Structures are given as structure tokens and as C-alpha cells.
Amino acid sequence: MIKKTKIVATISDKICTTDFLQELFDAGMNVVRLNTAHQTVEQAMQVVNDARKVSDKIAVLVDTKGPEIRTVGQGVEPKVKKGDKIKLKGDPEGKTTEDCLFVSYKDIIKDVPTGACVLIDDGDVELKVVHKDWEFLYCEVVNNGTIKLRKSVNLPNISINLPSVTDRDKMFIEMAVKNNIDFIAHSFVRNKYDVLAVKNIIEKAGGNTKIIAKIENREGVDNLDEILEHAYGIMIARGDLAIEIPAHQVPVVQRMIVKKCVKTKRPVIVATQMLHSMIENPRPTRAEVSDIADAVYMGTDAIMLSGETAYGKYPAEAVKVMSKIAKEVEDDMETNPPNMTIASVDNEITAMLAESAVKASLQLPVKAVIVDTLTGRTGRYISAFRGKYPVYAICYDTAVMRQLALSYGVNAEYMPHHSSRSMFVRTAMDKFITRNKFKDDDLVIVIGGSFGSSNGASFMEIAKIKDLITKED
């Protein structure tokens, strides 16, 4: 039985070939992630085209930059020591000197109070604001280091008034819509309006690309409920999150986000430094293995690799290690079910049928759940109840098939649309028997809809394969 937890792998155009992607796909990769902070549109499209040559089941996720602050790209890189004094100013056109640091956010002086801390390059250098006037923030250096150009600037617990979508983000979002890319992962989502800003661009461009909201600051955590109402799914971006909130709170926040996503039937990705040591080393640390296992035990839909596959020395090995850990934990969960949150029904017929199917599969010798899904909703709902057996989703749109590449335990297959329930059942049975997934005497659960995509699932049938086929004949 294949693994249920999905794997997202970040791919750089610098090392991308169809052979490389095929190796990662064979090792267990389900979704290709593109980090647009380091790519042009042309470079990103090279990766997209290569992924589609490998398999039409590989989903593509485009990561935007979002409302971020960085040190400017001009000037020197000051080497600072604890206790040094340095001025800070917001001007994207400025040039950093030994005693004055320029950052990209013009209103930083207005938004940052005295006593605040400024973290540079993922916290490698910390500054404390001791005084401010109309022109500068006057800071004291907290630790030794080098303030490098074009590096991240974090302001923990401070709300900044940056637009959610930059011009560069808009360019990549429109590219995603034009080329039928599956997901936009929008960075630094603070509230529902950040999600709606991206959704507005997608709708104006006439697309159906799904939005994954990246939670990586305090505002995003605090406003998670309203974000979940508008986003397709969530990515827990633990790198910036561990800078924006105290690091010791991140495991608690991660568990809370996974629970809420599962309950609301939204796909959730746990990301950042899951196998960081494998950028340089062929084997993971024990702590990394435990980190991945813990995420799977929590019930996350997907786990993500960043530098490990984008520029690491052992990309395929990293995917294989992640797959093995996920599968080992999933096997243990079958015999020792953890106490995890499952989805809520919320008076929805589709959700009720999904819950009933999972419960039935635990009480009967069922081999699989087979789902008829036009929009992917029924597949996602059954996934959210975290059943023991795989879910085979029959999709009539290749975009829906790829979107389900992010949902736990779902194996999506494309099939030309059939107008009747009987044709769906017969064709689905033939498809799986032909591929030797099932035998004639195997018991399966079939869920489908008879009243259009807006009404979701409307029936559930439990029967042996041979009986289903005989019935439809």
C-alpha cells in the first residue's frame, strides 16, 4: 500500500531536468513547489513544463513573496559587534553604509516603536531600537554578525502596513492562471483580506487556481479562523514563524493549525527544515526523523522539502527518506490509531457520507473507497476523516486530479465524464481491475453524486467488485 501523506518538493530551474523530476516522482514526490523569490517567469515555466512531461498527476505550487521586508541590495555589508550602534532607515533606493542600514519598507520608522527588536536574515543579527526620530531608528546591536544585502527583516509582534500583493506577485499569479497551475502559496498572510486580494486577481484573470495561505507571523496565527474561510489550504511556514513568535511556541501552534485544518476539511502542509541536514549529508538527524513522524502522527496532509531538493546534494535521497518515515508512521497508525482530530460534519450531506464511508471501512473488510468527484470536494472530505484505506478519486478534470495531490490518502485518476451513475461505477471498476488494484471478490465502498456538482455526493454503496459490475450490466 502506498503512502498517504503527500510530499511537496521545492525545485530550482538550475538543476531541473525531466530525469531529475522523474527520480523524485518515483521516490514519492507529489507536488512541485516553485519559489518565485529566486526565479523569473521564464525559469519557473521551464520547471512547470518539465514536471508536466513527467506526469500529469504532479501538481505545481507557485510560492509568492508577499508583504515582506528586506535589506536593500546596494551598499556594503556591515560587520557588527554586540553593543555597536547603527541607524536604520526605510528607503528601497538607499545604499547601506557601515553606520546606516537601509531596508525596503518606507514606513518602518512610523510603524516600529522604541524598544522593539529587528531581526535580520532569519534572526542571525538582532537589533534593538533604543530611540527614533522622523528620519531614523537608532538601534543597538544585540549579537555579533554581518548584515548582508537582500536579506529578510522580521519585526516580531509588529503589524506592518504593506500591500498584500506586490507587482511581482501579481505577475506570477497571472502566469499561474494563464498556464493552469494548480496552487498559489501566498506568503505572510495576515488576515482574510490578504487571501481575497489574491483571489480577486485569479478571478479577474478567469482562473481557478487554488490559494494556499502561508502562516508565518503572529497576525496569521491570530486570524486563522477567518483565513480558513477563504483559503483552499494552509502551509505552516515554520522558518519565519519561529522568528515572528517565540520558537518554543511553534510546536504548539503547529498542532493547533493542523487540528483546525483537518476539522474544516482544508489541506495542510508542514514546511521548513524538515530534513535540513540532508542539504549536505546523506542521512538525516534523529531529531529530523522525529519531526517528520510527529507531523504525520498529527494528521498533516503534506510535508515539504525546501533547500533539500532545490539545491541540496541528496535531493532524491531526501524524498525517499521522507517517504519511508511517512509510510512507517502510517503503518503504525493503522494498528495503534492516534487520538487525532477528524473533520466535522456541519450538516453537510457530502460530509455525512464521507464520515459514514470511513466508519464502514473500519467495520467491514473493505479494500478501498472509490469516489466520484467533479470538483474534488468529496475526495477532500473523505480525506479529512483520515480513514485506514486508500481513497481512489475518479476525476473528470485533470486540474481537479492534480489538486487532490495535496490531500491525505487520495489517489486521483482522470476519466472522461460520464453522464450516469451506472456508467461511472462500471468504468471505475473496469479501470481498477485492469490495473490489478482489486480482485472480483474484494469489497469496496462507492460514493458518488446524482444531482450535479453543486450538490456534492448523494449516495453510498457497499458491494463486491463482481456484484457491482453484474448490477451495471
Image (cartoon, helix red, strand yellow):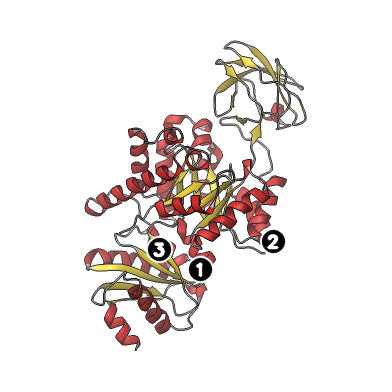
Q: Which residue is mark 2?
A: 205
SS at mark 2 in the image: loop
Residue name at image x 65 percent, y 34 percent: 69
**Residue 186 visible from this viewpoint:** yes
Q: Looking at the image, do the residues carrying marks 2 and 1 touch, with CB atoms under 8 Å apart?
A: no
Which residue is under mark 1?
375
Which quarter of the rendered picture does the C terminus lie within?
bottom left
In the picture, measured across the screen, residue 235 lies left or right of residue 26, that is right
Q: Quick one: SS at disc 1?
A: loop
Q: Is residue 297 visible?
A: no
Percent x, y for residue 369?
Answer: 33, 68
Mark earlier in primary sequence (1, 3) = 1
In which image quadrant can residue 138 be found? top right
Residue type, label 3: Asn
Considering every residue shown, the one lying at the far bottom of the view is 473
Residue identifier under label 3: 411
Q: Residue at x 35, y 71 (%)?
A: 435
Q: Amino acid at mark 1?
A: Thr
Q: CA distance from mark 1 to mark 3?
A: 15 Å
* Residue 429 against residue 220 in the figure, above or below: below
Among numbered discs 2 and 1, the one appearing first in the sequence: 2
Local packing at callout 3 (Cα closer than 10 Å; few below 14, some 14-19, many 20+) is many
Kind of residue sitting beneath label 2: Ala
Residue 223 point in image, percent of width and height: 53, 45
Choose between 216 and 428: the one closer to the eye. Answer: 428
